[in-house]
Amino acid sequence: MTPSSATPDADPTDPADPMTGAAVAETLRRLRERAPLVHNITNLVVTNTTANALLAVGASPAMVEAIEEVAEFARIADALVINLGTMDAARALAMPRAAASAREAGTPWVLDPVAVGALGFRSGLAVELLAHRPQAIRGNASEILALEALSGPQASGSGSGPAGRGVDSAHGPEAARDAARRLAARTGAVVAVSGATDLVTDGHRVIGIANGHAMMTRVTGLGCTATALIGACLAVQPDPLVASVHGMVLIGLAGEIAARGAAGPGSLQVGLLDALYRMDDATLRAGAAILEPVMAGADRS
């Protein structure tokens, strides 16, 4: 995510158009009004950041990970977030159980395939989780390239694919555009690819989000936080494409605002939480940089 001077083609004040700042503001209004319960099975590094970001936008986070509890809780939650960041045997058992329960109950859920393609154990689990039909998938370009390759018709469903460096991407979002579209078409999930310009696709449309700041890459867990915000948006916005775009706008614009007054990554992290908490209609109408169609190779910096 990097800042952009690009101006969206749509009227940013039109709430009837879901790809405008005004529509993002309406989703945020619903979040604050309904305080949806967002069930997170996430990683140890980002638990605090994720919970605080969800609180800042008005959602109610719950970090329920015990295998004895996840199925029950996924049924009563308004959304489920599954993040593969710090894997162990217990999480590997709990995640499919929660996803299956969410699917049965009609609870929307989002998958974050952290470091898929780099490590075989989590790669196999990510492919297994796709069978439970997430509404959305968010990852960096290398993760999306790997997940698409591993879950394709010629894949074994385990092992490694086009890998990044652990949680870091070795590719830009444009490199994953076609893979994201194929993955979305195959799974029925909306796929969001984080990068300098974020890309979100349902397999047909490709939407760009040009909000954010380069300093965000120096704070751990902000991609995971983006996934959690998509989960919160799924709880109040039934269209997964719209929810995913809105979640990416919220994290990107908050990071952009926080960077203006940040001395470095530490103050940016705190400022981002403040920016999410203070986000309002005027800020979203003026600052949301939603781009459609996204032109291949376009310079959005």
Image: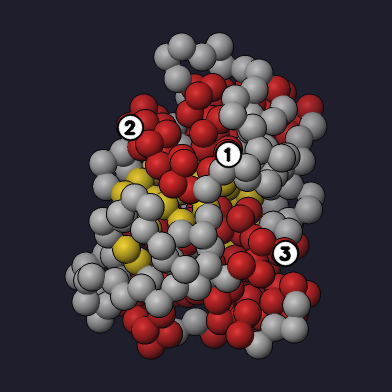
- Three-letter code for the amino acid on which mark 1 is drawn: Ser
Which color mode does the image show?
Answer: secondary structure
On screen, residue 110 versus residue 178, left or right, reads: right
Q: Earlier in the sequence, mark 2 or mark 1?
A: 1
Q: Tags 2 and 1 in contact by the CB under 8 Å rule?
A: no
Q: Tags 3 and 1 in contact by the CB under 8 Å rule?
A: no
Q: Residues within 10 Å of mark 3 (few under 14, many from 20)?
A: some
Distance, label 2 to label 1, CA atoms, is 18 Å
Q: Residues within 10 Å of mark 1 (few under 14, many from 20)?
A: many
Q: Which residue is mark 3?
A: 219
Q: Nearer the viewer, mark 3 or mark 2?
A: 3
- Three-letter code for the amino acid on which mark 3 is drawn: Val
Question: Viewer-proximal residue, 40 or 193?
Answer: 193
Judged from the image, the secondary structure of the residue bearing numbered disc 2 is: helix
Q: Which mark is residue 142?
A: 1
Q: Earlier in the sequence, mark 3 or mark 2?
A: 2
Question: Viewer-proximal residue, 18 or 60?
Answer: 18
Q: Earlier in the sequence, mark 3 or mark 1?
A: 1
Residue occupying the point 40% across, 77% down: 5
Residue 212 in percent (x, y) is at: 53, 69
Q: How many marks?
A: 3
